[in-house]
Image (cartoon, rainbow, N blue to C red):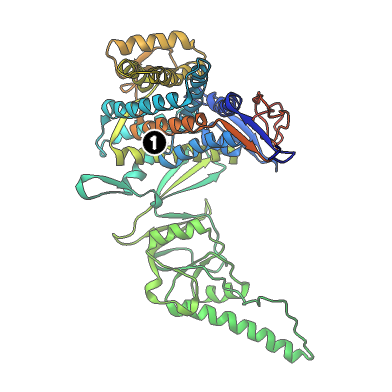
Amino acid sequence: MIIMGEDAQRVKDRDAQAYNIRAARAVAEAVRSTLGPKGMDKMLVDSMGDVTITNDGVTILKEMDIDNPTAEMIVEVAETQEDEAGDGTTTAVAIAGELLKNAEDLLEQDIHPTAIIRGFNLASEKAREEIDDIAERVDPDDEELLKKVAETSMTGKSSELNKELLADLIVRAVRQVTVEAHGGSHVVDLENVSIETQTGRSASESELLTGAVIDKDPVHDDMPVSFDEADVLLLNEPVEVEETDIDTSVSIESPDQLQKFLDQEEAQLKAKVDQIVDSGADVVFCQKGIDDLAQHYLAKQGILAVRRTKKSDIRFLKNITGAAVVSDLDSIEAADLGRASVRRDEADELFYVEGIGDDVHGVTLLLRGSTDHVVDELERGVEDALDVVASTVADGRVLAGGGAIEVELASRLRNYADSVSGREQLAVEAYADALELVPRVLAENAGLDSIDTLVDLRAAHEEGQVRAGLNVFTGEVEDAFDAGVVETAHAKEQAVASASEAANLVLKIDDIIAAGDLSTGGDDDGEGGAPGGMGGMGGMGGMGGAM
């Protein structure tokens, strides 16, 4: 009996598991070489020819044109890690891929997927318990340790060259937007931290500014550009002649009629400007356009106006100034205005807006770089560092990096496996082996022997050196914490949890029913075969198969 369409494909049982595992592993393999201080970068070219150069795991996976459903589930691991922890995306994806590789070995030994899933769940829960046990508590006021966390996050990225300066800026920014909540906990509001970029100068000239930075020009040359105390209006309405929603035509029979028509448009603009003047505003940041005639009227009134302000800047200015965003000039009130000092930096062609009062706060990280590609990657590195420092302040726990935590967890999980009965014990041991992928890849990416490195790390941890990690620059095993390689415990917990859940989700699938091709590569017949590589990369040749 035929119940499926002619173009439908179905992959069942072992073939489906093999297909899914290979697709997921292909994604993990794509980002493994970016892990660690010695990781390499990827160049990604989209269909429009735009180039992105990065070693940020989530950015790579988002930019890749992935069209395989299983592979997309692994990409979600990176996105979840980015949203929840801010960093560790490559680690999470790499561990997920290694878990599935080890699971494939267990499947070949006729161990049922449900037993593997149960074992992985047990191992994941135990690993998170051990992370909490190993983690060291950190004082939110310990700036030196927070700087080490930021520097560790930026190491291996383009921001590494100026990591000391940037780490100082990041920690200062986080501290300025941190408030102490009830019970002694700390809350970091990163909504009050804005990042602006500027090309043409060195990254060493980056700076932290109190308030907002607006990369716009005044709409009229005769407008004042500096105010010590200004009433600020945030406007989400164009200061232009209102247009009808439908196409209209106007028949004019004499010059007088034309003049009346123009006079009416001018009066309409004058009325809008009068509403702004009557509100008491000194500075107007408009998200929409401002007509040339309205610009003239505003300049005559001594009002500074900036048009086409980005939506994100308007939202940030709202926090800085305490102003409300006005969408209708007819309903404007004095209470809608905010207070701020505004000054113009003519050299950089930037406006600096600093709030007035204790109830408004916000800072801007002004990042500088020589080119657009440099400053884009610098921004990605700083955003990750901001997230991990904020997470450290809020969570209050840190770990030694350099593969130290993974080797220690693997050792403790192997001891734990002895207490697990049934075939789940093998899955727990496979989980422990998967965690050791991190120090192995760190060594490989640094050009070191991964086997010798792992042996040395295991020996150090067996001697009770919980913080023993790999120094990828010397190849020696040392106390990673004392060496300044510090990671946040929350990011590691999230990586372990996300990788485990993704691996279990893939393992639980034993039947794939597709209405058409399972991948954009089109090289597979879908019956019994698993794709051999990666396809659907949007014109990036040589990678055909699973994606």
Q: Is residue 476 above or below residue 54?
A: above
> In the rendered view, would you say 460 is above or below 184?
above
418 vs 248: above or below? above
Q: Position of residue 355 (x, y in %)?
A: 36, 60
In the picture, the quarter occupied by the C terminus is: top right
Q: Along the horizontal axis of the image, is 76 left or right of 392? A: right
Res 174 visible: yes
Q: Residue placed farthest to the left in the image?
A: 183
| Left or right relative to 509: residue 340 | left
Crowd tier of the residue under label 1, counting other residues whose Cα lies within 10 Å: few below 14, some 14–19, many 20 or above: many
Query: Which element type, helix, strand or loop, lies under badge 1?
Result: helix
Q: For the point 52% across and 51% down, which residue is it? A: 347
Visible residue check, residue 519: no
Q: Quadrant of residue 81?
A: top left
Looking at the image, which residue sits at the far front? 1
In the displayed structure, does residue 76 sit left or right of residue 166? right
- Residue 279: x and y, percent? 43, 77
Q: Nearer the viewer, residue 480 or 302?
A: 480
Q: How many marks?
A: 1
Q: Residue at x 45, y 17 (%)?
A: 473
The image quarter in which residue 407 lies: top left
Q: Is residue 324 left or right of residue 158?
A: left
Above or below 391: residue 230: below
Q: Nearer the viewer, residue 158 or 87?
A: 87
Q: Residue at x 45, y 63 (%)?
A: 226
The residue labelled by disc 1 is 167
Q: Position of residue 469 (x, y in %)?
A: 37, 18
- Please tell me which residue lies in front, 368 or 176: 176
Give the residue type at disc 1: Ala
Q: Quadrant of the N terminus?
A: top right
Residue 445 position in % (x across, y down): 52, 19
